[in-house]
Amino acid sequence: MDLPVWQALHQELEAKHFVPIAVAFDSAGNAAAEPWIKAANPTYPCLIDMHHLVAELYDMVNVPNAVWIDENGKIVRPTEPAGVTDSFRTMDRKTFAMPQDAVDEMMAKRTAYQNALRDWADKGSQSRFALSGAEVLRRMHTPDDDRVRAAANFRLGQFLNETGRAAAAVKYLDEAQRLRPESWNYRRQALSLKDPTNPLAAGGPEFWNAVDALGKEKYYPTADDI
Amino acid sequence: MANQPTDIICGETTSRAVAADDRNDGLWLSAADLQQVSGWVFKPEGFCKEEVCVPVPPSRTAEFVSGQSYNLVALAGLLGQPVVADTANHAWCIGESSRERRRVLQSLDAPDFTLPDLSGKMHSLSDYRGKRVFLVSWASW
């Protein structure tokens, strides 16, 4: 949970017209998100996105994913993992301990990402991390028919769940995942909705099996310029 | 016509208990409900929303119009929008077309949205024009 990290950056960079907008992909709404937001005591907007609308609009498949948007409302970095690495995959699944080199790698990436945000807040379009339009387009993943169909299935499943028809919802949540297997948002939100009394449902054996099935593929495919 | 109270999610609008008939794999609504649910209005030039009109192929009019009712599923097909239905629960979702999603993203204009904070106060991305916005996702799960 990075809300306190973004809070520290906001305090540091607010005078440079920098603002984080954090969006919670939480179908359970305030009940799920509130304790985390209260603990971070944010001075920047923390919004609740029960329907994962922002994920659909910006083609986000995981958390934390981020987009940088300049003063004119233009995208200058498209959706990418926000300063996170695959280091967690080396974790001991009982003790949660990680080898020191994995911890170092994780912290280095986090620092580099925050420094890139500082550079952008300082220099705006002159920052080397603010990409040209052509480079944004090159990196951007754009929605195809399977993706919009996945989104419609997820939305219907989420609606059925929200209106007390959890059993009927499963089929649509599963179909969203089948059409968009790379969406950890669909996968983990569904695990959480199917087992609502278990706060660790989205990080249990099903999650780890899916992570293991990635093999050499990245869980967080980060850009190589940060 | 056998109307059922039907829940219809269309884009960001959710309409509960709309009188609709789901015969022949379609979803037939009155003109008023079609407009309320989807924003589209049927006119002589075709289906229209704001300044945009999409003509209906004359040979296929019967797929779209039957007396005073209009087929939302056929309209979605015309617009390239995905349709997902749970007919047992009379619940439907009409999504956005991939063409429209691509058009918006590839313009590089950040798509606007409006969402609540914990207190229920609504915020739009466009409220923050003039700032360098770091839009970042997270989740409790």
Image (cartoon, coloured by chain):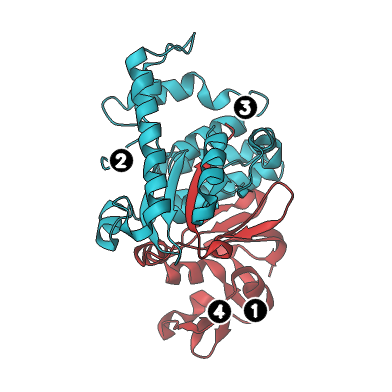
Q: Amino acid at mark 3?
A: Asp
Q: Which residue is mark 1?
A: B31
Q: CA distance from mark 2 to mark 4?
A: 55 Å
User: Disc 2 vs disc 1: Cβ atoms closer than 8 Å?
Assistant: no
| Image hue for chain B | red
Chain ID for label 1? B
- N-terminal of the pair, mark 1 or mark 4, is 1
Query: Mark 4 Cα within 10 Å, few/some/many (few <14, many 20+)?
Result: some
Furthest-bottom residue in this view: B44
* A168 or B10: nearer the viewer: B10
Are labels 3 and 2 assigned to the same chain? yes
- Confirm whether residue A27 shows in the render: yes
Q: Amino acid at mark 4?
A: Val
Q: Which mark is residue A226?
A: 2
Q: Which residue is mark 3?
A: A195
Q: CA distance from mark 1 to mark 3?
A: 41 Å
- Residue A80's x, y, as percent? 37, 44
Q: Amino acid at mark 1?
A: Ala
Q: Which residue is mark 4?
A: B65
